[in-house]
Image (cartoon, coloured by chain):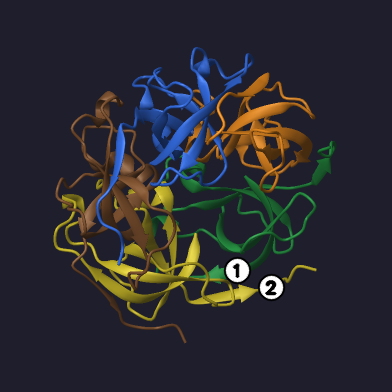
Chain colours: A orange, B blue, C green, D brown, E yellow
């Protein structure tokens, strides 16, 4: 479960039938202070709601498969929420 | 299965319906000597019991999906225990 | 979910029965600017449509298992789409 | 599937109900020549048989979930065998 | 899905019952030019056919679990094919 910023889109007309109608977005992973970490990745926008420039949180791996009930998609990164705020309460000593 | 310290919270009002009512916490992974390792990550608190500043252990990957029986959540990091103590008995020679 | 370029093929006559009839391709992972990142890997071409030199997107991990309905294959990298274009709309500031 | 040495224990009284009665051990991953590699991790001892100082092999990821039939545990590292010997037959040329 | 060379064996008499009768091999991962990459790992030989010195391809993660129909094994690396040849057709420009 990670936080990232939507920075672009991917267009693909030939694809697995179960992916028809889904949007593919490029997400730049961020750390908890909103600095970029790791490489951008391609995520399915299961909320159908994430816009370019927004901060989202996403899941990776097998979990991303089940995000749409009754529809098993070959997906391994899925946007599952839009982040309103991140609060760091306790720093490590 | 890793150990970490809860250092903050994430607020997200728009999210996957199956995530309604869950708490999202920021966890700093620690090694067995309680030094920070790797980037903090966002975890679902399935115990509904972990407070900021506490040491927890968490699971990642597909396993985290099944933590709430009968409810499949798009989750890939889940807090599953509060750590009382870590004992290093044998060092490697 | 990552983007890559097909750069070669793997031939294997002795293999798990569930893999009979599948094509194995070597894919070089690319970042969103089409620069190579990480090591090439071996992917199953579930579209039966990806040619050498094409840009594809692929999934990894447990998700890749379910790509052919009714047929559970021991697969952990699967090509699920051919990329037409990648658009970077917003750079991080 | 990796090899490691048991070097300590973790005590946690508050935890996910499905984890009651399991032992949590700290395992130092080793390479095939018994040198430590990577960070120690917390593993469930599903054999109920691994002692501190023993060399074990363990699985990670979703596979670790199913190690106890009929009991789905939120587990991502599980000890599944005690290693008697490791034999390196062929070095790479 | 990766390519590797079988370089040794692991003997373990005490192990999870579902692993009885399986062979454990040490596999050195190779890149597409047959150079060693990453650490050797322990794989289950589900083909019962891979010999020391042979080039194999293997899967990792949850996919490896289902390689033997009707038998769920706690396995996360499984050999699923013997490689005859690897052909690099197109280099990246």
Q: Chain of mark 2?
A: E
CB contact under 8 Å: marks 1 and 2: yes
Closer to the camera, A86 or C26? A86
Asked if residue C16 shows in the view, the reply is: no
The answer to whether A92 is drawn above or below residue A85 in the figure is below
Q: Chain of mark 1?
A: C
Q: Position of residue C56 (x, y in %)?
A: 69, 52
Closer to the camera, B28 or E44? B28
Quarter of the rendering containing residue A16: top right
The answer to whether E3 is drawn above or below residue C69 in the figure is below
Q: Is residue A10 left or right of residue A32?
A: right
Check chain identity for marks 1 and 2: say if they share one. Answer: no
Residue that numbered label 1 is attached to: C9
Q: Is residue B32 left or right of residue C44?
A: left
Q: Residue at x 32, y 76 (%)?
A: E8
Q: Position of residue C7 (x, y in %)?
A: 68, 66
Residue that numbered label 2 is attached to: E89
How busy is the neighbourhood of tag 1: few (under 14 within 10 Å), some, or many (20 plus)? some
Q: Residue at x 61, y 37 (%)?
A: A17
Q: Work out which residue is located at the far bottom of the displayed protein and give it.
A: D93
The answer to whether C77 is drawn above or below residue E5 in the figure is above
Question: What kind of element bears circle 1?
Answer: strand
């Amino acid at each position: 479960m990670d936080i990232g910023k939507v920075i672009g889109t991917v267009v693909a007309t030939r694809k697995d039938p179960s992916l028809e109608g889904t949007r593919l977005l490029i997400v730049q992973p961020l750390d908890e202070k909103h600095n970029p970490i790791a490489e951008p990745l391609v995520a399915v926008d299961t909320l159908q709601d994430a816009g370019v420039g927004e901060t989202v949180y996403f899941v990776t791996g097998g979990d991303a498969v089940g995000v749409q009930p009754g529809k098993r998609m070959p997906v391994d990164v899925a946007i599952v929420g839009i982040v309103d705020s991140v609060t760091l309460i306790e720093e490590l000593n």
